[in-house]
Image: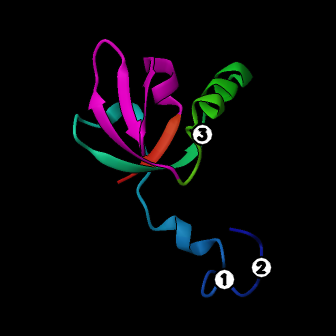
């Protein structure tokens, strides 16, 4: 994928391709996942996620899905609306 002739063996980015991408919005209560990337199309949404501490590599656990997606990240608990949660790509 990176254009090198060597392929993916020993490639520093290849280790990140083993996961199956999923949206934070699709996780059930009690599910634990790691944020892989932020796919929010709007710049304002991206800034909101970054301000809340939702960053690639952060591990989170879903506490509630309604009326907002509530997730725990370490000692912090944040609430995300459906649009923000849909823009967070995670792996379990």
Question: Residue 31's x, y, as percent?
Answer: 26, 44
* The stretch drawn in magenta includes residue 79: yes
Q: How far apart are marks 3 and 1 (CA)?
A: 26 Å
Q: How far apart are marks 3 and 2 (CA)?
A: 26 Å
Q: In the rendered view, would you say 91 is above or below 64?
A: below
Residue 38, labelled with which disc?
A: 3
Task: Determine whether, in the image, residue 86 is placed left or right of residue 65.
Answer: right
Locate residue 26: give its quadrant. top left
Q: Residue furthest front?
A: 75
Task: Determine whether, in the image, residue 9 is placed left or right of residue 6.
Answer: left
Q: How far apart are marks 2 and 1 (CA)?
A: 6 Å
Query: Which quadrant holds the N terminus?
Result: bottom right
Locate residue 29: give its quadrant. top left
The earlier-in-sequence mark between 3 and 2 is 2
- Chain part drawn in magenta: 58-87
Q: Which of 10 and 46 is in front in this view?
A: 46
Is disc 2 placed on a helix, strand or loop? loop
Residue 76 in view: yes
Query: What residue is shown at x 46% (from left), y 22% (from top)?
Result: 80
Task: Determine whether, in the image, residue 27 is placed left or right of residue 44.
Answer: left
Query: What residue is shown at x 27% (from left), y 32% (from top)?
Result: 63
The residue wearing badge 1 is: 7
The earlier-in-sequence mark between 3 and 1 is 1
| Cβ–Cβ under 8 Å for marks 2 and 1 | yes
**Which tag is nearer the camera, tag 3 or tag 1?**
3
The residue wearing badge 2 is: 4
Q: Which residue lies furthest to the top in this view?
A: 67
Q: In the rendered view, would you say 46 is above or below 8?
A: above
Q: In the rendered view, would you say 45 is above or below 33?
A: above
Question: Residue 54's x, y, as percent?
Answer: 55, 38
Question: Residue 64's x, y, as percent?
Answer: 27, 26
């Amino acid at each position: 994928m990176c254009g090198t002739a060597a392929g993916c063996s020993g490639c520093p980015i290849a280790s990140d391709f083993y996961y199956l991408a999923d949206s934070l919005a699709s996780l059930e209560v009690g599910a634990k996942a790691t944020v892989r990337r932020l796919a929010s199309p709007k710049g304002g949404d991206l800034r909101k996620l970054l301000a809340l501490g939702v960053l690639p590599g952060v591990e989170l656990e879903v506490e509630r899905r309604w009326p907002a997606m509530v997730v725990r990240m370490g000692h912090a608990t944040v609430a995300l609306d459906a649009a923000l949660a849909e823009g967070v790509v995670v792996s379990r």
